[in-house]
Amino acid sequence: MQNRLPIIFILITVVLDAMGIGLIMPVMPDLIQEVEGAGLSDAAVWGGILATTFAAMQFLFGPTVGNLSDRFGRRPVLLISLVIMAFDYVLMAVAGTIWLLMIGRIIGGITAATQSTSAAYMADISKPKEKAANFGLIGAAFGVGFVLGPLLGGVLAEYGTRAPFWAAAILAAANAIFGYFVLPETVTDRIRRPFEWRRANPLGAFTNIGALPGLKRLMLITFVYTVAFFVYPGVWAYFGAERFDWSPGMIGLSLGIFGIGIAVVQGLLMKPILNLIGERKAVILGLSIDVLAFVLLGFVTNGWVALALTPLTALGSIAGPALQGIMSRTASDDQQGELQGAVTSINAVATILAPLIVTQTFWYFTAPQNPYYLPGAPFLLSALLTAFCIAVFMQTPRPKRARAT
C-alpha cells in the first residue's frame, strides 16, 4: 500500500486537474456577466479570451516547468503547482473585475504543470514496457475528472457563482498536503539534468526533443491528432443540438457517458490490449477506430445511434497512451520532464487552433446560405486528419532508446 500511495496521489492530481476545468465551466458565463455587467454574447467573447490566455501560457511555460522538474525534481514542482493552483482559485473566487480573472488564468496557465509533471513522474517509476499502460491510467483519471467536474460544478453552482472556485481551492490544497506526506522524489543524481534556458522554451524544447530519432514525426502526429480529437469538446454540444435537437441536459449526459467510456478503456483495457498487440499496433488500431467513428458520426442522423457509437469512440482512445509510451521510451531518463513539457506545449497550440478550425467548419456547413448542409462535417475533417496521422506513423521507424544527456 505504501508503494501505491504515490500513484494514488498522481491519479488524484490528474483527476483534480480535469475536474478543475469542468468544475468552473457551469458558472463562468454567469460569473463573467456578474463582474462585467455584460450580456451573454459579450460574456462568451471574454470566456474565449480567458480560455485562449490559459492555453497560451501553457504553450509558453510548459517546457520551462518540465525542465525545472528535470533539474529540481517532480515532488517540489507538483506540490508547489498544487499550492499555487489553490491560491489561484481563491483569487478567482474573490475577483471583482475581469482583469483579476485574466490574471488568474495567466497564473493558472503558467503553473498548469500538474498533468505533464504527473506524466513525467509516472514515466520515472515505470519499466519501459509498463509506460504506455500507466499513461493509460493517467488518461483514465482524466476521464473520471472530465465526468465529475461538470456534475459537481453544476451542483455547487446552486450555492452561487463563487462556490465552485472555493471547492476547487480546497481540493487542490488538500491534495498538496496529501502529496507532502506520501510523495517521494524520483529524480536522482543519476538522471538529474542542469536547467538550461535554451532548452526551457517551446522552440528550444521542440528542437532538442525533435532531434531524437523518430520523435519529430511522433510530435507532429500528437499535434494533428489532438486537433482532430478536439472535435468532441469543440462542437459536440452544437452538433447534438443541431442534428438531434438535444437539450443541454442530454448533451451533458452524452459527454459524461463518453468520459466514462474513455476511463474504462484506458484504465481497464489498455494493459491487456498492449500485452496482446504491443504499442505500435495499438496506435494504428486506435487511430483506425477513430477514423471509422468520425466517419460514422459525420453522417449519423439519429441521436440514439450516436450514443450507441460511444464504446467505439472510447476504444479509439488507446492510441494516445500508446503513442505517449513510445515517445517516453525514446527519450532518456533525464529528459522525461522536458518531453512532457514539450507535449504540453504541443497540446496547448492544438487547443488554441482546434476550436477555431472545428467551429468554423461547423458554421460553414450549417449556415443558411450554404447549399451543402452537413452538421457532421467537422467529424469528417477529423477523420481526414487522423488518416494523415496513420500515414505518417506507418512511415515512422521504430525509435531507439536514448541515453541520458
Image: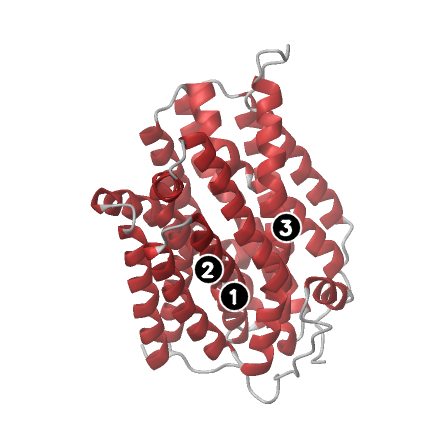
Q: CA distance from mark 2 to mark 1?
A: 7 Å
Looking at the image, is 342 positioned above or below residue 247? below
The residue identified by callout 3 is 349
What crowding class fits label 1: few (fewer than 14 Cα within 10 Å), some (14-19), or many (20 or more)?
Answer: many
User: Circles 2 and 1: CB distance less than 8 Å?
Assistant: yes
Looking at the image, is 268 positioned above or below residue 306? below
Mark 1 is on which residue type? Ala
Tell me the number on the disc at residue 119: 1
Q: Position of residue 200 (x, y in %)?
A: 67, 71
Q: Position of residue 18 (x, y in %)?
A: 42, 54
Mark 3 is on which residue type? Val
Residue closest to the far bottom? 189
Looking at the image, is 374 positioned above or below residue 352? above
Nearest the viewer among 346 and 255 is: 346
Instruction: Identify the element where label 2 is drawn.
Output: helix
Between label 3 and label 1, give the one nearer the viewer: 3
Q: Position of residue 325 (x, y in %)?
A: 59, 62
In the drawing, does residue 55 fall left or right of residue 331?
A: left
Instruction: Identify the element where label 1 is drawn.
Output: helix
Position of the N terminus by quadrant = bottom left
Which badge, 3 or 1, is on the more N-terminal residue? 1
Mark 2 is on which residue type? Ile
In the drawing, does residue 208 fall left or right of residue 148?
A: right
Residue placed at 39% from the left, 54% from the top?
20
User: Circles 3 and 1: CB distance less than 8 Å?
Assistant: no
Nearest the viewer among 378 and 110 is: 110
Instruction: Identify the element where label 3 is drawn.
Output: helix
Position of the C terminus by quadrant = bottom right
The residue identified by callout 2 is 138
Residue placed at 49% from the left, 75% from the top?
77
Residue placed at 62% from the left, 77% from the top?
333
Q: CA distance from mark 3 to mark 1?
A: 19 Å
